[in-house]
Amino acid sequence: MLLLDHVGKTYANGVRALEGVTLNVDRGEILAIVGGSGCGKSTLLRAVSGLDRPSQGTITLDGEKIAEPHEKIGIIFQEPRLLPWLTVAENVGFGIAHLPKAERERRVTRVLDKVGLTDKAGVWPRELSGGQAQRVAIARALVPQPQVLLLDEPFSALDAFTRTDLQDHVLALWADLKPTLIFVTHDVDEAVVMADRILVMRPRPGRLYEDIDADLPRPRDRQSAAFDFVKRRVLAALDRSLDRAVSVDDRQDKAEQGAAMWW
Amino acid sequence: MSLVHMTLTAAPATAEAAPAIRRRPSRAWLGLVLPVGIAVIWELLVRAGWSNGRLVPPPSVIFDTLWDLAKSGELWTHTLATVSRVAAGFAVGVVAGTLFGAVAGYSNLSRRLMDPTLQALRAIPSIAWVPLFILWFGIFEQSKITLIAVGVFFPVYLGVMGAIMSVDRKIVEVGRAFRLSGPALVRRILLPAVLPTYIVSLRSGLGLGWMFVVAAELLGASEGLGFLLIDGQQLGKPAQIVAAIVAFAVIGKTTDWLIASASAPFLRWEDRFSARGEER
Ligand SMILES: Nc1ncnc2c1ncn2[C@@H]1O[C@H](COP(=O)(O)OP(=O)(O)OP(=O)(O)O)[C@@H](O)[C@H]1O
Ligand SMILES: [Mg+2]
């Protein structure tokens, strides 16, 4: 279990990016984090990944304190960040260089197959499309079999079609080993399609605002009433988090507009 | 690592290899058109009597001179002397430049500490060191090699330092996320990332090495291609001077090509503007 206990982060320039974030994430849970720009979502994820240290509070994974990158925690960034001097297969195997060669090759082949890039194993990253590159990045993060996988707006640079495709890929990969997934997104649909639980954050200073249950049956039907209901709740919470008070009657309209407006 | 590159990329590459191979020779010829054309025209002008070719000897005379020098074995002695000076100076300069550049690029403290001094030293025209080096190291090999090493040092130092400082933070973060630090981070992330710039600085360092070997040999040597230059001037043999210049051009170009082609297999991943014609 991942525990955040009163985590705060104040940057050197005095910005209070996070304050008093306390959070429990169960093993295998899929958690989405949404919130306006600058409310500390990336800061939170980077603290959990161990790339940055929180200024206050502690983060523990199964009782172990996280103060630097940990082998059980993987991260996928907004950009693929592939190493241009390694082929796709070598990029995917980057994090498991310590394993014996045969085991490494077996795992790389397997995960490449899962993300549908077997035929690209030998090419350079420059020859990939944006969506393919992000799939390689996902494969690279998964291959060490992390217990927690963090994703910071992993699909935001992709078109809607590729995005849905990758959401399915991630869910399929998740079903395999059931790691804990924590992902940041600006896309409420994406949050509701993927997450068990959606956290809404609010800015200045960045803190948790609302914790919304999205425990719908999988695979999720975007047309269902339950889906719509959760989506409305999230949009309403987002509006409130940005101090845009909404009266009960026009919540529905606002929610529709909000989908396009709040970021 | 490179072996894996080869085997993995060999398959998709073969399909495109055929047209590339057919195109390449025609391009290489292009580079020879200008020098060969000028040589032929000059030869014809001298033969036709439009010029006596005494101060600027025609190609045939230069070849004769080179041939004579080669037959008597002099060409090899002189070439060997020059090449070994450059090799020694280049080796020393590259090692020192790489070490200092890496340390200055990696650690802010060491850069603040030593970069201003090194930049000030760089501002001194290197030839200005010659009298001092001769006093310190004598007039023989050591002072020459030192001068060459100084010439090679600065481009390598600057190149390595700049390259390390400008490695993309995001890429370094990938290494950190996979728990790399210290030597492992340097070997698996920083080194490959700086390699293209490093090769460029090695090549410019080598260029300066050739420049400084001439300076060193002009200032006093009993053998070496630079000595052939001075000897040709003092004895009024322009053909010998031009022959030495041609030798410099050939050897300089060859060594540069050696670096370029030795590094090419490691740089095939580059996403370069200039590579646009090679693909398709
Ligand atoms: N390295 C940094 N130094 C100083 N301030 C920073 C730094 N990184 C982020 N901040 C500030 O901290 C706050 C939170 O930033 P963060 O990147 O976590 O926001 P975010 O929620 O991820 O926003 P977005 O949705 O736009 O990505 C912002 O006000 C930002 O300006
Ligand atoms: Mg962010």
Image (tube, rainbow, N blue to C red):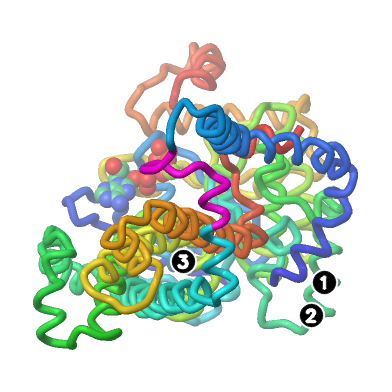
Question: Separation of disc 3 and disc 1 at Cα?
Answer: 25 Å
Q: Mark on residue A101?
A: 2
For the residues tagged 2 and 1, is the chain the same?
yes
Report whether mark 3 lies on the same chain as mark 2.
no
- What span is in magenta? B53-64
Q: Between tags 3 and 2, which lies in front? A: 3
> Tag 3: residue type?
Leu
Q: Mark 2 — on which chain does it sit?
A: A
Name the residue rendered at 38%, 34% in the picture: A241
Q: Are marks 3 and 2 in contact (CB under 8 Å)?
A: no
Chain to which mark 1 belongs: A
Disc 3 designates what residue? Answer: B190
Q: Residue A105: x, y in percent?
A: 82, 71
Front in this rendered view, residue A53 or B61: B61
- Local crowd size for mark 2, using a 10 Å CA cut-off: few (<14), some (14–19), many (≥20): few
Mark 3 vs mark 1: give the one in front. 3
When asked about the image quadrant of residue B129, the answer is bottom left
On-image quarter of the C terminus of chain B: top right
Q: Determine whether the residue tagged by mark 2 lies in a helix, strand or loop.
A: helix
B79 to the left or right of B112: right
Residue at screen point 47% across, 25% down: B50
Q: Is residue A160 left or right of residue A175?
A: left
Q: Residue at x 36, y 22 (%)?
A: A245
Q: Answer left or right for A213 relative to A87.
A: left
**x then y, percent, for residue A174:** 75, 57
Identify the residue position indicated by label 1 in the image. A105
Asked whether, in this view, residue B53 is left or right of residue B268, the answer is: left
B276 or A27: nearer the viewer: B276
The chain containing the residue under callout 3 comes to B
Vertically, is B123 above or below B113?
Answer: above
